[in-house]
Image: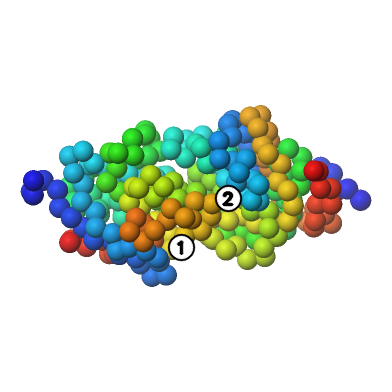
């Protein structure tokens, strides 16, 4: 079954991508996307996905779902500084390695898979878990 | 040119990595560049107080790398930890991170120190 956007979905975080840094395609090849809200200092722009959040309500937890342009990845681990970084700076490093322990304090680990390459206008959301637990692994592998 | 600026030593704190770094601002590199958000971090303020350097909030405006005596960050391990060392700017991370992430190769003990608290900044 596909757990679509069911009624009662709780969106913890929602943002629109403004620009994608020149180094992001390479990072994404290694399973990493770094997000930073638009006030990020200029020297970071090459290495981050700049965005403008419209919802910054609460911090992610394991079992929540990270969504980028509708592709869903279950969150497997949340580093110790993710809550503060995300809610204060719009900053998080998303790693699609399925790790159940965050190796670095700023890591948000999600199910293993190929992260989509965002573009200006892309939407990223973090949705509270529960309903989404059925899709622990993304099954489609776009290639 | 002794006089205007003083040196400080910044050592790794508990669980931290790298350093110690000696920070000495100059007329051409006067900035204690704080990239932590939410204003000037106490570690950046202490470095500025002891050295005579000028605190600068990287979220308010931007400055060229060549003006930065030291960057103070609160990076969780991937992005900010690498950007400043990549440009040969000495970097102090408040969090106890070690070299990691796509820019790890640039993070060396002569440019980077982590886990730093205000007490880890001492007169040199």
Looking at the image, is mark 2 or mark 1 nearer the viewer? 1
Is residue B112 visible in the rendered image? The answer is yes
Image position of A128 (left or right of B56): right
Tell me which chain the residue with mark 2 is part of: A
Q: Which mark is residue B78?
A: none
Instruction: Farthest residue to the bottom: give it.
Output: B14
> Residue at the spot x=80%, y=56% of the render?
A137
Residue A89: percent from the left, percent from the top?
50, 44
Q: Residues within 10 Å of mark 2 (few under 14, many from 20)?
A: many
Element marked by disc 2: strand
Task: Answer with the quarter of the image where residue A17 lies.
Answer: top right
Task: Give the image location of residue A39, x and y in percent.
Answer: 47, 35
Residue at the (84%, 44%) spot, across then down: A4
Q: Quadrant of residue A123?
A: top right
The quadrant in which the C terminus of chain B is found is: bottom left
Q: Residue A88: x and y, percent?
A: 50, 45
The answer to which of A10 and A123 lies nearer the viewer is A123
Residue name at image x 47 percent, y 55 percent: B105
Query: What residue would you read off at disc 2?
Result: A93
Residue at 20% over, 51% down: B24
Number of marks in picture = 2
Q: Residues within 10 Å of mark 1 (few under 14, many from 20)?
A: many
SS for tag 1?
Answer: loop
- Mark yes or no: residue A10 visible: no
Circles 2 and 1 on the same subunit? no
Query: Numbered disc 1: what chain?
Result: B
Residue B29: horizontal and vertical position, in percent?
24, 41
Task: Say whether marks 2 and 1 touch (CB < 8 Å).
Answer: no
- The residue tagged 1 is B98
């Amino acid at each position: 079954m596909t757990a679509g956007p069911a009624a009662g979905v709780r969106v913890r975080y929602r943002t629109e991508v403004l620009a994608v840094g020149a180094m992001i395609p390479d990072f994404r090849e290694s399973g990493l996307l770094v997000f930073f809200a638009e006030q990020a200092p200029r020297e970071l722009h090459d290495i981050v996905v700049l965005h403008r959040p419209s919802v910054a309500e609460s911090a992610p937890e394991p079992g929540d779902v990270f969504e980028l342009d509708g592709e869903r990845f279950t969150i497997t681990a949340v580093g110790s500084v993710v809550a503060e970084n995300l809610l204060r700076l719009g900053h998080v490093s998303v790693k699609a390695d399925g790790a159940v322990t965050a190796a670095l304090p700023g890591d948000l680990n999600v199910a293993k898979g190929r992260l989509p390459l965002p573009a200006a206008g892309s939407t990223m959301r973090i949705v509270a878990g529960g309903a989404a637990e059925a899709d622990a692994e993304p099954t489609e592998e776009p290639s | 040119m002794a006089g205007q600026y003083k040196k400080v030593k910044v050592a790794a704190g508990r669980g931290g990595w790298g350093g110690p770094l000696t920070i000495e601002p100059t007329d051409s590199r006067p900035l204690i560049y704080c990239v932590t958000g939410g204003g000037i971090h106490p570690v950046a303020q202490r470095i500025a107080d002891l050295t005579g350097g000028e605190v600068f909030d990287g979220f308010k405006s931007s400055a060229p790398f060549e003006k930065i005596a030291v960057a103070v960050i609160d990076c969780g391990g991937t992005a900010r930890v690498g950007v400043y060392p990549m440009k040969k700017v000495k970097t102090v991370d408040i969090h106890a991170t070690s070299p990691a992430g796509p820019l790890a190769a640039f993070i060396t003990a002569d440019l980077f120190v982590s886990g730093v608290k205000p007490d880890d900044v001492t007169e040199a």
